[in-house]
Image: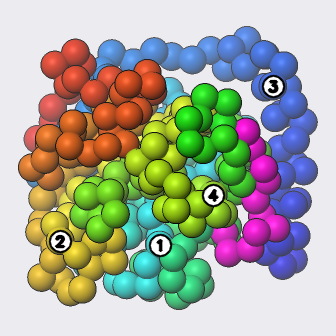
Amino acid sequence: MDRRAFIKSSIGASAALGSLLNFGKYEKLFPITSTTYDLIAIKGGEPDIMFDKGIEALGSMKTFVKKGQTVVVKPNIGWDVPPERAANTHPKLVSRIVKHCIDAGAKDVYVVDHTCDEWQRAYQNSGIEKAVKDVGGKIVPGNSESYYQSVTIANGKSLKTTKEHEIILSSNVFINVPILKSHSGTTLTIAMKNLMGNVWDRRYWHRTDLHQCIADFATYRKPDLNIVDAYWVMKANGPRGISIEDVVTMKAQLISTDMVAVDAAAAKLFGLNPDDIGYIRYAAEMKVGIKDLDKLNIKRITV
């Protein structure tokens, strides 16, 4: 089966459950368990071990993934560089997230990104493709417009429509896994900026009002969980970086259901004021999430 047929088959298999969810039966089937903490901040360990501790504090992955559901994980796999360059999400973290989803009873766990460099080389040389397959996850390409479906951004100011990858539209659970790093266009790329890898035409965002388009898209479908990888952090020359000299080792990780909160915390971790990042400020003003960390119940963990 080629990759295109694989995606169509996967979507067909999940269509019945997806239709049921659209008719408001979700809470009756799978009651959502509320969590005590708004944000989990972990430091001092390897990416996989920090995630183990963080998801445990939120009640385990079963809080977010129910038996038989389909899950899509969206790391940053944009660049054809090795993991230590910190342009892509750490493969150990992606692998561990997929493993937790499968252990929670997920029917299928897909991993996808619309890469900037050639997709097969980026998937392979990031280390993410092998890490995902080794634990039973499925890699999905994002390199063809035919994979994307038009969606309306009802609350968008500058971005009214876009084309989103169909595997994200068809999956029950959406997990966003950005890496924290510098970015020449937006100063930082974190959770909300990572969602640009969901869509086909990113050039419109750049041509129009990049910060506002990022905030607009954040109003559309909020991920069920956001996990910010700050193990290796690219402090300069992002988003691709030039060499390992751009990278510092922070050994940190942030987890939240709130993209604005996790981006605000990541900005502070980077050493910047969240108010200085346009899309964080705009998204908070549009009530996507909470920017003021003093209003959050934060669990801090040292490994």
**Which residue type carries mark 4?**
Val
- Residue 236, numbered circle: 2
In the image, is residue 148 part of the stretch drawn in magenta?
A: yes
* Camera-nearest residue between 122 and 138: 122
Tell me the distance, in whole angstroms, between the alpha carbons under discs 3 and 4.
22 Å
- Residue 31, numbered circle: none
User: Which residue is at 33% across, 77% downward?
Assistant: 240
Residue 6 visible in the current orientation? yes
Packing grade of label 3 (10 A; few <14, some 14-19, many >=20) is few
Residue segment shown in magenta: 142-152
* Camera-nearest residue between 210 and 227: 210
Which comes before the other along the chain, label 1 or label 3? 3
Which comes before the other along the chain, label 3 or label 4? 3
Tell me the distance, in whole angstroms, between the alpha carbons under discs 1 and 3.
31 Å
Residue with the mark numbered 1:
78
Task: Specify the quadrant of the image occupied by residue 233.
Answer: bottom left
Residue with the mark numbered 4:
199
Q: Of tags 2 and 3, which is closer to the observer?
A: 2
Q: Secondary structure at mark 2?
A: loop
